[in-house]
Image (spheres, rainbow, N blue to C red):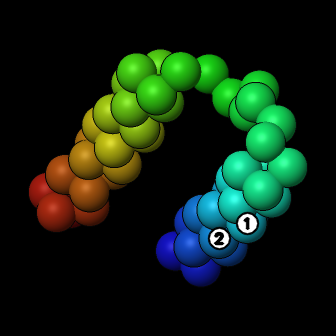
C-alpha cells in the first residue's frame, strides 16, 4: 500500500511542477485513466474474493 501512496505523491508533485511551468501533461486523457483505474480495481477485487473464499 505504501508504494501506491508514494506513486500518488510523486504524480501530484510532477503535476504541480507541470502546472507551474504551464507545460501540457503527456498523460492520456482523464477518461483513459479512469478506465485504467477500473481495470486495476477489478483485478484487486478478484484477488480479494479469492482470499476470502480460502
Q: Which residue is mark 1?
A: 13
The image quadrant that residue 51 belongs to is: bottom left
In the picture, which quadrant includes the C terminus?
A: bottom left
Seen in the image, is 48 located left or right of residue 29? left
Q: Which residue is mark 2?
A: 9
Q: Where's residue 3, x and y in %?
A: 65, 70
Q: Residue at x 74, y 33 (%)?
A: 25
Neighbours of disc 1 within 10 Å: few (<14), some (14-19), many (20+): few
Residue extending furthest toward the left:
53
The image quadrant that residue 6 belongs to is: bottom right
Q: Residue at x 82, y 37 (%)?
A: 23
Q: Which numbered disc, 2 or 1, marks the residue closer to the eye?
A: 1
Where 1 falls versus 24 (above or below)?
Answer: below
Seen in the image, is 36 located left or right of residue 51? right
Neighbours of disc 2 within 10 Å: few (<14), some (14-19), many (20+): few
Q: Are marks 2 and 1 in contact (CB under 8 Å)?
A: yes
Measure how far apart labels 2 and 1 are at the Cα level. Answer: 6 Å
Q: Residue at x 65, y 70 (%)?
A: 9
Q: Is residue 50 visible?
A: no
- Secondary structure beneath disc 1? helix
Amino acid at each position: 500500500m505504501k508504494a501506491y501512496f508514494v506513486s500518488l505523491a510523486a504524480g501530484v508533485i510532477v503535476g504541480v511542477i507541470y502546472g507551474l511551468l504551464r507545460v501540457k501533461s503527456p498523460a492520456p486523457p482523464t477518461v483513459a485513466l479512469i478506465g485504467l483505474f477500473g481495470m486495476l480495481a477489478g483485478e484487486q477485487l478478484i484477488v480479494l474474493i479469492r482470499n476470502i473464499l480460502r
